[in-house]
Image (spheres, grey):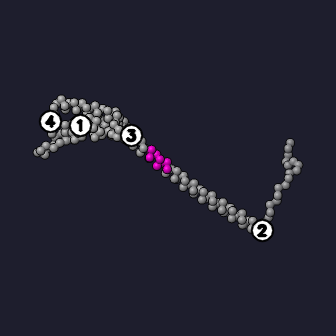
């Protein structure tokens, strides 16, 4: 491929810089991410222009717009380090991960509470069953005429009990 003129190169660099600014502001095209592929598409250049090239003798030379790709990645990392995420999809993914973590913690807490309640339920049922057996045993003893004293029925209170002065 032939060399491009200085004017064309300058025009493409300006387009790349404008695309970098748009992407870092969060103005992403539909289906795009905040990455080099989207940057290249937005600027109208090939993605390979952002990567180093090999000469015929095997030596490495920088790509024509590699310095702009490095600037883009540096600025993106600065924004992410400051807590600003330029890519709304990445922000949504992070938000969903945080929500998932919160829900997992909540689920673990509820599972522990449920286990505790089931243990309490089992204890309560055991106590009720033991009380029922005791009541049945006492009824059987009374019916058999054993030495079980019947409790007196409640008397009606007539008159005053104690001092009312």
Question: Is residue 144 in view?
Answer: yes
The one of 38 and 151 positioned closer to us in this rendering: 38
| Count of numbered circles on the image | 4
Q: Looking at the picture, does residue 115 appear above or below residue 69?
A: below
Quarter where residue 98 is shown: top left
Quarter where residue 141 is shown: bottom right
Residue 106 inside the magenta-drawn segment: yes
- Indicate which disc, 4 or 2, sits on the residue closer to the N terminus: 4
Measured Cα–Cα span from mark 4 to mark 3 = 40 Å
> Which residues are the magenta region?
99-107
Residue at 63% over, 59% down: 125
Residue at 47% over, 47% down: 103
Residue occupied by mark 4:
3
Residue occupied by mark 3:
91
- Indicate which disc, 4 or 3, sits on the residue closer to the N terminus: 4
**Secondary structure of the residue carrying numbered label 2:** helix
Residue 58 inside the magenta-drawn segment: no
Q: Is residue 145 left or right of residue 82?
A: right
Q: Position of residue 151 (x, y in %)?
A: 80, 60
| In this rendering, the label closer to the viewer, 3 or 2 | 3
Q: Quadrant of the N terminus?
A: top left
Residue occupied by mark 1:
45
Residue at 42% over, 44% down: 96
Measured Cα–Cα span from mark 1 to mark 2 = 101 Å
- Indicate which disc, 3 or 2, sits on the residue closer to the N terminus: 3
Residue occupied by mark 2:
143
Residue at 49% over, 48% down: 106
Q: Is residue 1 left or right of residue 68?
A: left
Which SS does the magenta portion mostly show? helix
**Secondary structure of the residue carrying numbered label 3:** helix
> Do callouts 4 and 2 mark residues in contact (Cβ within 8 Å)?
no
| In this rendering, the label closer to the viewer, 4 or 2 | 4
């Amino acid at each position: 491929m032939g060399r491009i003129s200085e004017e064309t190169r300058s025009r493409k660099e300006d387009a790349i810089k404008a695309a970098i600014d748009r992407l870092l502001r969060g103005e992403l095209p539909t289906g795009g991410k905040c990455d080099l592929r989207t940057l290249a598409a937005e600027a109208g250049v090939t993605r390979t222009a952002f990567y180093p090239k090999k000469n015929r003798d095997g030596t490495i030379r920088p790509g024509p717009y590699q310095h702009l790709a490095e600037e883009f990645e540096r600025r993106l990392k600065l924004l992410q380090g400051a807590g600003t995420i330029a890519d709304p999809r990445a922000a949504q993914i992070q938000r969903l991960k945080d929500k998932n973590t919160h829900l997992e913690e909540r689920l673990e807490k509820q599972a522990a509470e449920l286990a505790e309640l089931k243990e309490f339920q089992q204890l309560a049922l055991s106590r009720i069953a033991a009380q029922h057996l005791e009541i049945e045993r006492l009824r059987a003893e009374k019916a058999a005429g054993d030495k079980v004293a019947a409790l007196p029925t409640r008397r009606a209170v007539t008159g005053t009990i104690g001092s009312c002065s």
